[in-house]
Image (cartoon, grey):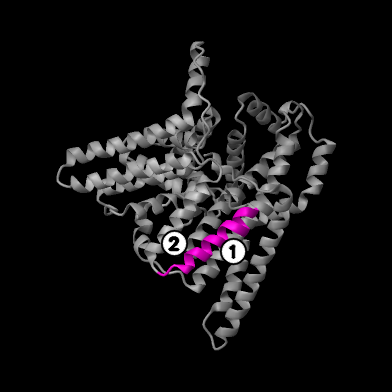
Amino acid sequence: MVFSSLIFLYLFLPACLIAYYFCKTVKAKNIVLVAFSLVFYAWGEPVYVLLLLASVGVNYGCGLLMGKLEEQEKKRKWVLFGSVAINLLALVVFKYAGLLVSSFNALTGASLPVPQIALPIGISFFTFQAMTYVIDVYRGQVKVQRSALKFLLYISMFPQLIAGPIVRYADIEQQLDERASTAEDVFRGLVRFSIGLGKKILLADHAYNVCKALLDGGMQSATVVGTWFGVLMFMFQIYFDFSGYSDMAIGLGRIFGFKYLENFRLPYMSLSITDFWRRWHISLSSFFRDYVYIPLGGNRKHQMVNLLVVWSLTGLWHGASWNFLLWGLYFFVLLVIEKRYYGRYKKAVPKPARHAINLLLILIGWTIFYFTDFAELGRALAAMIGFAGGGFLSTEVKIQLLNNLLLLLVCIVGVTPLPRIIGDIFGLLCASSEEESTKKKIYVIISFVFCVTVIALSTISLVGSGFSAFLYYRF
């Protein structure tokens, strides 16, 4: 099941909210959320609920075992090692087995059968989330969770189960035991959910249609303008798709009383690659920083080797294809250049120029990310520098540009601070004053109209398509 489906919007979510707010105790609310979360995950492929439950069981058990071995450091290390190994083994088997076997066959000339294993949705997200719990228990940063129900809820809660953000146990430990969901929480959660829904259905999905039309027909006849425009629309698609999901997850979490951390902070406004990765998919970049980069030595020793490991893993995390590894290594090279050379002089470069350079580098990165076929990737990169088989600009591309000019302008505005500035201006209506009650009513009315409008437009768009999967589901 996906958030951007009519079944979720008009059946699953209303039923879940009714059942949740009918309950009087936190334990009852937790049971409702667990039940609905398992149904949510099982909607597509019920068999993989068993994998989810197995992951929960293993990591829950390892946490309990560590709690019993508080004075036996060596045994605790073995428990940690075993937990991490099992989690990574599950990722390798279900996500990378086909890639590894096919690559082995290609390199050696062998003809081993390539496993055809369907990728469990969200396995990378819930696996990393479970690992953070066990590692933090080992480090003594969180207490052992002795309630199987609460731990199951932590891993399986449907708002963030399938595509993040990666929620650390420490961030919601207290909320599993005690939380409040006020009328304001519900209201602001609904607004945030509506923003994410609009990003996904009204922007990302339409950007995808343009991108697909320009890039998926084979790059032999690509034009220069068509390739640039197609990759640009993919850059918008992946941002609005993933940040839209994060907005919906954060909004839903707030409706149920959970406070999730931000996952995006206007990444396309960054002035450097370092800054970009502080703003993009924050929960993943902070995971690799805290659980891989710093334990390896961070900036203190072997920094370049540590960066190479982190960015190789970051690339492979995104999918079982070698172009993702190349994408990770591309950002590794950029970061090395930035840290060793460019960083010394970047302040001398005017900010608009730094911003333009950064966007260009990010755009090239998304080109590598998009094409899983290296031959097609090569043709796309060649087309972008003028070696296009279809020339500079075709009639078809010109039509695409004219038909989607409004979409392009909205996407450009949407990645800037302007929408937030407008939202803050409306938020000032809630400022304390003698007319506080009136201002709040105006703010609520405007926000309610916005939510209804977005949901209505999204519903109209979904009626023809049924549902649209999120891009990051496959990761």
Residue drawn 51% across the image and 18% down it: 113
Residue at the image position 46 percent from the left and 42 percent from the top: 49
Q: Is residue 389 above or below residue 190?
A: above
279 lies left or right of 385:
left
Residue 431: x percent and y percent? Answer: 53, 79
Mark 1 nearby-residue class (10 Å; few <14, some 14–19, many ≥20): few
| Mark number, residue 26 | none
Q: Are marks 2 and 1 in contact (CB under 8 Å)?
A: no
Q: Which residues are magenta?
A: 6-24
Return the disc, 2 or 1, that comes first in the chain's sequence. Answer: 2
- Looking at the image, residue 113 lies above or below residue 37: above
Residue at the right extreme of this rendering: 395
Residue 200, position in %: x, y? Answer: 63, 52
Q: Nearer the viewer, residue 444 or 383?
A: 444
Residue topped by disc 2? 259
Could you tell whether 198 is left or right of 299 in the image? right
Q: Is residue 377 visible?
A: yes
User: How many numbered discs, if any?
Assistant: 2
Q: Main secondary structure of the magenta part?
A: helix
Per the image, the residue denoted by label 1 is 420
* Front of the two marks 2 and 1: 2
Which residue is found at the position 41% from the left and 60% from the top?
A: 30
Real-space Cα distance between discs 2 and 1?
20 Å
Image location (x, y in percent) of residue 26: 38, 65
Q: Is residue 175 magenta?
A: no
**In this orientation, does residue 304 appear?**
no
Q: Amino acid at mark 1?
A: Arg
Q: Local crowd at mark 2 within 10 Å, few (<14), some, or many (≥20)?
A: some
Q: Identity of the amino acid at label 2?
A: Lys
